[in-house]
Amino acid sequence: MMMGFSEIPHFIRSRIWGPDLDNLAPWLRVTLRSIRICWAVVRDLHGGELSLRAMSLVYTTILSLVPLLAISFSVLKGFGVHEQLETVLLQTLLPLGEKGVEIGSRIVEFVDNVKVGVLGSVGLALLIYTVISLMQKIERAFNFIWHVSQERPFAQRFSNYLSVILIGPVLVFSSLGVSASLQSTDIVKTLTAIEPFGSLVNFAGTLLPFVLVVGAFTFIYVFMPNTRVKVRSAFAGAFVAGLMWNMASVFFAKFVVSSAQYTAIYSAFAALIIFMLWLYIGWLVLLAGASSAYYHQNPEQVSLIRGAPTLSLRMVERLSFAVLTAIVNHFVTADPRTGADDLAGELNVPTGVLQLQINTLSLAGLIVATADTPPRWMPARAPETIPLSDVMAAIRKHGENPALAFDNITIRPVTDRLLSDIEQRQTEILAQLSLADLVDPDKDNSAPANLVATLRVKGGPGDAAE
């Protein structure tokens, strides 16, 4: 009996998202987890953010492609392998058919016309700046996927990007050269003539481009986001992106063959439009793979509904105090595990939600980031000098807009006095305690009454109540 369309949401909730993965067999656990990740990636693609960033990267790529290839050409020329640049470029544009050959030849022609010696120092600086701008926009797209709000410092960004731009082409062409040399050796030729080794060698030759694509994507997923990405998760995302890349190449090649009418309509612009469309698909595949890597590393972020959960006021207060207590406790015990991912695992909350509270506490001047990559967090000043009243005030006042002033809201006097008394009473109590009191090991497993006792010793409002 066929399942009706209206029953699909219930089926998905009960069969895909309902079971607890920890209680399932390994093969079923992996299957359901893969289906959930695919659902999350497709949901993000449907949301439009990845599509918008892919479009933005297409525009930046067109502006930066010739300078990027010019720098790569100059580096490869020193190694004597610059002739292979056109070959690799044509292989990348192969799904475009005859248009790909035309576009590749034009790009190489532009690159040949770029003379570094003629550009001068200012021209060379602009050339490098254009390429680094492309790398920076790529990093921002990956940081968005990984919910990272802080970019690399400028000096580190410049050195890292330049290293990739200069060393990356050498590594790529070296791997291609090694694979070509191996295929041309006498041993490989002898094995090719013997079955089943011949079929295995041909299969390996067919599989090699896919392996190189997955390897390149894995490197990008590990390097580009300003956070720690596990190689296993990066490889999982790269494998998905590699499969999508191969499928996109096949379907796009068929699309180009059957799109003769577009050439008649757009005339000379047809090649440019097809090239831009292929760039868009390529960037979308790369970003979708990055999203897969993110969900593979952060399975707690995989949910049926898109977007971060809305936190209640008491959840915001609880999470903020939990973050501060954890950071101060690690600071006191000299424990370096204070990155966002470490804290998210310790507090059992999604990294994206935790990062919002970290940003709030950072803007309030309660915590500061270290210069590490990714950054770790520590108290902005000595814990005993941070009263809990300052913490609560920072949490409650975050997000207030000057356009809607707090005092401009009309409220009845009796209600205003009630709210003011509640806030004053809370401030008086919390002012007697500091963050150091919350991480005191003597109080770690104590009853709440001990904090009241602390207030009485300090002469707090508990004495007046008696």
Image (cartoon, rainbow, N blue to C red):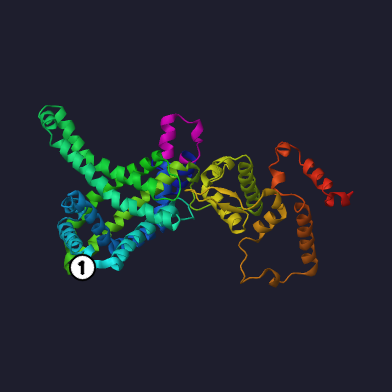
Q: Quadrant of residue 337?
A: top right
Work out whether residue 314 or residue 392 is closer to the camera in this orientation and state it: 392
Residue 240 on image: x %, y %:
34, 43
User: What residue do we see at 77% from left, 69% from top?
Assistant: 412
> Residue 286 lies in magenta, yes or no?
no
Which residue carries the number 1 mark? 269
* Residue at image point 25% right, 67% down: 119
Q: Amino acid at mark 1?
A: Phe
Q: Residue 307, can we see it?
A: yes
Residue drawn at x 37%, y 50% as measured from the top left: 288
Q: Residue furthest right?
A: 466
Picture coordinates of residue 332, whole percent (x, y): 64, 42
Q: Nearer the viewer, residue 40 or 181?
A: 181
Q: Quadrant of residue 431?
A: bottom right
* x and y percentages locating residue 170 in the rendered image: 25, 47
Q: Dot 1: few (<14), some (14–19), or many (≥20) neighbours within 10 Å?
A: few
Residue located at (42% from left, 54% from top): 156
